[in-house]
Amino acid sequence: MLFNRTNLSRRTPFFYGWVVFAIASTLSLVRPVMAVATLSVFVVPMTSHFGWSRGSFSAAVSAGGLAGAIIAPYSGRLLDRYGSGHVLAIGSFVTGLCAIGLSLVTGPISFALAYIIGRMTYVGPMELAPSTAVSNWFVRKRALAMAFMQASQGIGLGLMPFIAQLAIANWGWRSSWQMLGIIILTAGILPPLLFMLRRPEDVGLSPDGDANRSGNIPDQARQDPFKYDFTLRQAVKTKTMWMLMAFSALMFMVQAGVSLHQAPYHIHQGMGATQAATIVTVFAFSSAIGGLFWSALIVKVPLRLVITTAAFTQFSGVIAIMNSHGSMSGYIAALIFGMGLGGVAALIRLIWAEYYGRRHLGVIRGVALPAQITGQAMGPILAGVFFDFTGNYMTAWTMFAVSAAIGTLLISLSKPPRLIP
């Protein structure tokens, strides 16, 4: 299999990294079947059907996130050793089965088991693998490739809730889960298993296609591949790594909490379920646009300044959501929040590779990712519990606004680390 893929990588009329990019982007498009934005359209029909509280419903999201935090470091080591292909294929298989399993739930235990395992896979290996694959194959064009991959995820975050809501409206929530499971099983197993390779160096190429067809790497390309080669031991000694982890925890706590509860929030204010789902779709598509917009800026503007501005935009989006009381203000708030989040999500992946290099990127991100996942786990359940106790979302939105403000300050102070042998 490796021999065939090696030959294919050299015979393609273009750089094989774009094949890896296409597969990673496709998986980024379909993996949001377990995103909280997708789950948000199931909150009302499933809690109404079973009589569950929103806090207990959100607990499955948090538990799945914490489970993902546990397996993330191991996923990172597997990525560095074996590459993203096998990790993505197995992750897609597990996620698809869990989505189909959610169509069969009869109570809280079966729901928790199916969603926790699916969510664990989504936030752990399925989060790490696509961005690690793209980062390994691109250096000069990394920002461009990561931006378009993030855009595909943003499109998926818009499509999956919309598809799910249409299926719910026509056939019910059980059929909707089945459809989502079939989508990821179809798209996510064979392509990465058959065509993905770990790094260009494994097949005699170099990042960005700077090797000629004989496999010889020119001097210009030799200068770059592992220039910022932090080991895990070196990375954890830098203050920047811990600041990036804290930033990720805060901003993605806000992301997950708002993503899951924005549709229920608008429904609670009297909006129809389908219209609330369209607001989620606007948020998701604006995050795709945001990823492209902010990534394009780093060509001329320092990366840290751009991600700080994106984080401030996400904070502004939370403030806008707090003050939205109708469809138009809801769309505007979703647009602002999505634009900011799209930049944060795209650039945080980029900044890890830019600050710490490629060789040990999987294990470094695997160790750092639990902070982000823990934040994502806490956001939904805190918002759900606050709603259950107060009967509204204002306390949750205030907490998220403060968290986003602190996160913006942290990233503004996160300077590139120095490599000390």
Image (cartoon, rainbow, N blue to C red):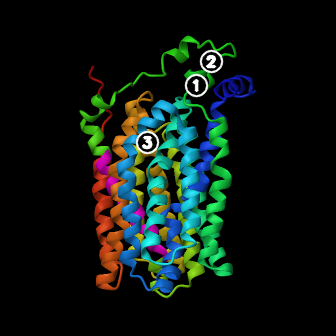
Query: Which of label 1 and label 2 is nearer to you?
Result: 1
Position of residue 204 measured from the top left corner of the image (x, y, whole percent):
60, 18
Q: Are marks 3 and 1 in contact (CB under 8 Å)?
A: no
Position of residue 134 measured from the top left corner of the image (x, y, whole percent):
55, 37
Residue 85 lies left or right of residue 413; in this view the side is right
What residue sits right under mark 3 in the picture? 75
* Dot placed on the residue nearer the N-terminal end, 3 or 2: 3
Report the magenta stretch's main SS: helix
The dot on residue 211 is: 2
What residue sits right under mark 1 in the picture? 200
Residue 13 lies left or right of residue 332; in this view the side is right
On screen, residue 15 above or below 51: above
Q: How busy is the neighbourhood of tag 3: few (under 14 within 10 Å), some, or many (20 plus)?
A: many
Q: How busy is the neighbourhood of tag 1: few (under 14 within 10 Å), some, or many (20 plus)?
A: many
Q: Give, as a three-letter code, the residue at label 2.
A: Ala
Q: Give, as a three-letter code, the residue at label 1.
A: Pro
Q: Which residues are magenta?
A: 245-263
Q: Are marks 3 and 2 in contact (CB under 8 Å)?
A: no
Q: Residue 355 sits in which quadrant?
A: top left
